[in-house]
Amino acid sequence: MEIQSVGVIGAGQMGNGIAHVMALAGYDVLMTDISEDALKGAIETISSNLDRQVGRGKVSDQDRNAAMDRIKTTTTLIDLGACDLIIEAATERETVKQAIFDELLPHLTPTTILTSNTSSISITRLASRTDRPEKFMGFHFMNPVPVMQLVELIRGIATDEETYDACRRVVERLGKTSAAAEDFPAFIVNRILMPMINEAVYTLYEGVGSVKSIDSSMKLGANHPMGPLELADFIGLDTCLAIMNVLHDGLADTKYRPCPLLTKYVEAGWLGRKSGRGFYDYR
Ligand code: CAA
C-alpha cells in the first residue's frame, strides 16, 4: 500500500516538525490538536522553519508554498479517520495516548496504519489495546525533525512486514535514514542518550562541575553539537524524566535511577526551553 495522506496528532515541537517534513515530501497532512492556539502556533513555526530552509538555499520558494498548502488542521480528532498513516505525537504519557487511540479507533478505515512517535513507551502494549496490532508500530523522529537524519522504526511483537515496509518507504521518501529497533524500553537512541543526560545531571548534583563546565566539556571534549544539559533543556526535562522512569521501571536496574535534581526541576515546572527555564534561563 502506498501512503498518500498522513494524520499527525499533536502540534507541539515533534508534531509540527513531522507535519513539516511530511508536507515537504509531498504527503497531504492533516494535523490535529485539542488547542486551536497550538495549531496556529504550529503553522507559524512550520512557516518560519521553511523560510529558514529557503534562506539557506535548501528548499525552493515553490516547494515551500506547496508544502504549506498541503497542511490542513483540525481540532476534531476523528477527522483523521481516513488518513493512510497516522503518527501520534501527543504528550509522552501513556494514559493520554491511550485515550486518543480509544477515541480514534472506531473511525479509522481498516487499512490505516497507526503509529506512535513515543520515545520510550512499549509499542507492543499500545498496539495490544487497538483493533490492529499488526498495523501498529513505532515511528520515532528526532528533534529538530527537519534537521535530524534518523527515524527509529520500532516493531511491536505483532507488527506485520507490510506495515513495516510501508513505513520504511515513507522514511526513504523523506530523505531520512531509518534504524530498525526492537521493542524494549526506550529503544536505541534514548536507551543510550538518556542515561548520559541523567549522568550529566548527577555530575551537576554532586558538584563535580558547573552547568557551563559540564556542557563545554562534552562539546569540546567529545565533539557533541550541544552539551548534555543544554540538550536536556532542548528536549524538555519532563520528557527526559519520563524516559528515565520508563528505563528504570522496565529494566529494573538502579543504574537508570533518575537523578533527584532532574525530578526536582520538573516538580518546579523548570522544564527547559519550553517553560523558559531549565538548566539555563531563557526568559
Ligand atoms: N527547522 C529547520 N531547519 C533548522 C531547524 C528547524 N527547526 N533548526 C535548525 N535548523 C537548521 C539551520 O537552519 C541550519 O541549517 P544549515 O546547515 O543549512 O546552515 C542547521 O540546521 C544548523 O542550525 P544552526 O546553525 O541554527 O545551529 P547549530 O549549528 O547549533 O545546530 C542543532 C542546531 C541542529 C539543533 C545542533 O545543535 C544539534 O544537532 N544538536 C543536537 C540535537 C540532538 O541531539 N537531537 C536529538 C535529541 S534526542 C531526540 O530527539 C529523541 C527523543 O526522543 C528525546
Image: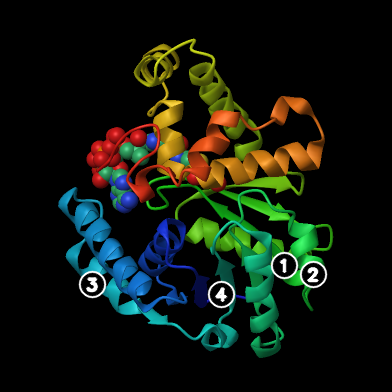
Asked whether 24 or 271 is in front, the reply is: 271
Q: Label 4 to label 3, Cα distance in Å?
A: 22 Å
Q: Quadrant of the N terminus?
A: bottom right
Per the rendering, the mark at residue 133 is 2
Q: Is residue 245 above or below residue 73?
A: above
- Which of labels 2 and 4 is toward the front? 2
What residue is drawn where x is 50% and y is 71%? 8
What residue is drawn where x is 37% and y is 49%? 275
Q: Amino acid at mark 1?
A: Phe
Circles 2 and 1: CB atoms closer than 8 Å = yes
Q: Label 1 to label 3, Cα distance in Å?
A: 32 Å
What residue is drawn where x is 76% and y is 27%? 254
Residue 187 makes an appearance in the image: no
Question: Quick one: label 1, few (<14), some, or many (20+) residues within 10 Å?
Answer: many
- Protein image colouring: rainbow
What residue is drawn where x is 68% and y is 61%? 94
